[in-house]
């Protein structure tokens, strides 16, 4: 059972959206899912509808990764995995990790 999620917000470099999406779905997500502790992933794209962004405007894509087991161990394994970003991905990203609430003992 997953006990945490990692939420990653990204954008492609201008004019490279197809390349970005091919890399993200075809290479990057499978790379992340090979890291111990990461057990699921799903990608989302923003609708072209205005909403209250809460000050977090500008990200078109969101990936949500499910984490199972000790979160510090999964994040350490991710850091050690040496996964490289695509040149088609904009350098500006937002990453946050959330745990179940209330946290499980």
Image (cartoon, rainbow, N blue to C red):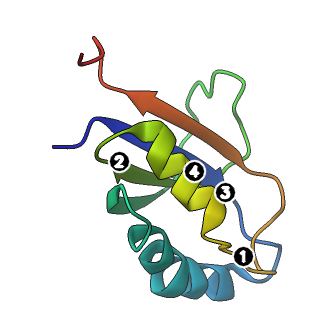
On screen, residue 18 above or below 82: below
User: Residue 89 placed where, x, y %?
Assistant: 75, 71
Q: Report which quarter residue 44 is drawn in.
A: bottom left
SS for dot 1 = loop
In the drawing, does residue 104 fall left or right of residue 34? left
SS for dot 2 = strand
SS for dot 4 = helix
On screen, residue 104 above or below 37: above
The residue labelled by disc 1 is: 84
Contact flag, marks 4 and 2 (Cβ < 8 Å)? no
Real-space Cα separation, disc 1 to disc 4, in angstroms: 16 Å
Within 10 Å of the Cα at label 2, are there few (<14), some (14-19), or many (20+) other Cα atoms? many
First in residue order: circle 1 vs circle 3: 3
Contact flag, marks 1 and 3 (Cβ < 8 Å)? no
First in residue order: circle 2 vs circle 1: 2
Q: Report which quarter residue 11 is drawn in.
A: bottom right
First in residue order: circle 3 vs circle 2: 3
- Of residues 14 and 22, the one nearer the viewer is 22
- Of residues 73 and 51, the one nearer the viewer is 73
Contact flag, marks 3 and 2 (Cβ < 8 Å)? no
Which of pointers 4 and 3 indicates the residue nearer the eye?
Answer: 4
SS for dot 3 = strand
* Identity of the residue drawn at 52% across and 52% down: 46
The residue labelled by disc 2 is: 67
Q: Which mark is residue 10?
A: 3
Real-space Cα separation, disc 2 to disc 1, in angstroms: 20 Å
In the drawing, does residue 102 fall left or right of residue 53? left
User: Residue 91 placed where, x, y %?
Assistant: 84, 61
* Identity of the residue drawn at 63% across and 86% down: 18
């Amino acid at each position: 059972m997953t006990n945490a999620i990692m939420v990653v917000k990204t954008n492609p470099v201008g004019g490279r959206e197809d390349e970005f999406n091919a890399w993200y779905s075809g290479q990057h997500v499978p790379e992340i899912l090979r890291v111990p502790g990461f057990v699921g992933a799903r990608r989302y794209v923003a609708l072209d509808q205005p909403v209250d962004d809460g000050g977090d405007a500008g990200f078109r894509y969101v990936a949500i990764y499910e984490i199972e087991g000790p979160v510090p161990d999964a994040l350490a394994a991710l850091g050690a995995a040496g996964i490289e970003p695509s040149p088609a991905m904009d350098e500006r990203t937002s990453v946050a990790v959330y745990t179940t609430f209330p946290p499980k003992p």
